[in-house]
Image (cartoon, rainbow, N blue to C red):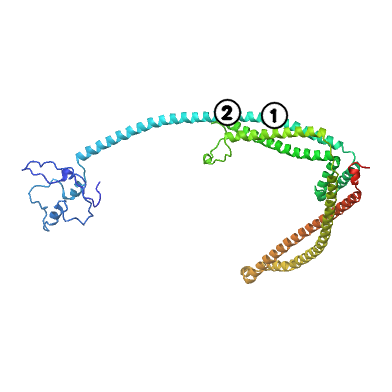
Amino acid sequence: MEFLGTTQVASYCGTKKSCLFPDPAPTSTTKDSYQSYYLPGYRHLSSWRPSLLHKVISVPPGSDEPYNPTGRPPTVLPTLRSALHARYSIRDWHHANMVQLKGSETSRYWAGRLNTDSVRLMQDKDQLTYQMQEDSRRNLGERISNIDFWRSELVYELECLLRETQALETAKKRLECAADEMQGPLKTALECLYYREKRKGIDLVHDDVEKNLIKEVDVFKDCQEILAKLAQRINHQLGINRDAQHALEQDLSDKNSAHFIDEKCFNLRNTSDSINFYHGVEKVDGTVSVPVTWAKFSEDNIRCSQHARANSVKLREDTEVGLESTSEEMWNQFVSTNLAFNNRIAEVADAKNKLQAQLAKVLQEIFQTEDTIMLLERSIMAKEYPLKVAQTRLETRTKRPNIELCRDEPQYQLVTEVYTIDDTLQTLKKRLQEARDTLQMLLANKSKIEHDISVKANSFFIDKKCMDMRKTFPSTPRLIGYT
């Protein structure tokens, strides 16, 4: 193949041999290589190409024979001279084959080494992956064993704490049973709680009054000074026990969750269905503890529970030997409950007044909404006749004969008028539906407000009745035992 504009020459296309002289010495391979690239028509002054073309062109016109200064026929036709300059030598051909064979042998050698190394690498990595997976599974098994140990310790301590808490609550009930001197105020407080259960709807709330009444009942049951003091200590100790119980239960719940998760991870296999890729999860470290702090956390919870149990046992022993009452505490609680009653009565009365005012506004808005609905209905009815006129005009104009059935300006105007009136009717009907929905909402709100007013009136009546029942209270001498 000859590339246009490329001056290529092989060694056998060099200087023409002469039969009178021996062959010249072989030249270097530099002469056999490709030469510089020159575009056609722009040869360099020192170009190596033969001047045959110039000699051919210089033949005088009119001569039938080609110009041949040596008198011998040329070995190559002049028109094929440029093709001969683009061929390779035998040396080039052998050299190219040798290079190709060596390159193929080298690539085949390196490919063989790569294949062997790849197989060995895959075997090593498979073994490493299997070993690391087994190590992880073994570590998970050890972790599950540690979790089981602390779970058993927490369950045992929690059972002991629950038994002690139950025993402490029993001691508290014994103190309450000893308080028989305050049956009258206690009965009044219980009746107030009973009557307040008759509240309705949203007013049946656990408010300050109910909290104070419950606390008053507890205080009255602990009428004796020593019993009240012991009851307070017991309540405090019960709070500590509940805190310790909550810590144990929370820790046990966390242990159960961790045990479930680690057991699930332990049972995962390469053929499991629930495995998936979670890219970047190995870079996220959300841990909050190490094995030492993890074990210390459960140990601290157990130690705290043991300390609470010891205090609870001591308090139960003190309850057996100490009895003391606090009449001042009962009086303070009575006053606090009455104050909560007064505040609650004022709040209910204020809420009732606001609801009544709101009811009046809602009734006014209902009246206005009904007027709006009536106006919208009239407006819709008023738009029906123009729509009939426009549609009748259109229908009548469809009866025009032949070429007179023209889509003229009146036709466009009538069509636009029909669409506009229809759109207006749809808008008015939508607004009418919204107004009706709003009216229904207002009516529902009115009914709800009326119901709330009745609920507030019922709550106001109940609280006033409870205050009438609480007009009397035992005197201080009677509270401390004097007749």
Residue at label 2?
142
- The image quadrant of residue 454 is bottom right
| 325 relative to 65, above or below | above
**Going by the picture, which residue comes out furthest to the bottom?**
409
Mark identifier at residue 102:
none
Which amino acid does the dot numbered 1 rest on? Tyr
At a point 16% along the width and 48% down the height, the residue shown is 77
Residue closer to the observer: 224 or 287: 224
Q: Position of residue 42 (x, y in %)?
A: 21, 57
Which amino acid does the dot numbered 2 rest on? Glu
Q: Can residue 151 be seen in this view?
A: yes
In the figure, is residue 262 to the left or right of 457?
A: left
Residue closer to the observer: 50 or 202: 202
Cα distance in 3D space between marks 1 and 2: 22 Å
How crowded pointer 2 is (Cα within 10 Å; few <14, some 14-19, many 20+) is rated as few
Residue closer to the observer: 232 or 189: 232
- The image quadrant of residue 447 is bottom right
Q: Can residue 452 be seen in this view?
A: no
Residue closer to the observer: 248 or 353: 248
In the figure, is residue 316 to the left or right of 469?
A: left
Q: Position of residue 477 (x, y in %)?
A: 91, 45
Numbered label tally: 2
Mark identifier at residue 156:
1
At a point 30% along the width and 34% down the height, the residue shown is 106
Query: Mark 1 or 2 closer to N-term?
Result: 2
Secondary element type, mark 1:
helix
- The image quadrant of residue 156 is top right
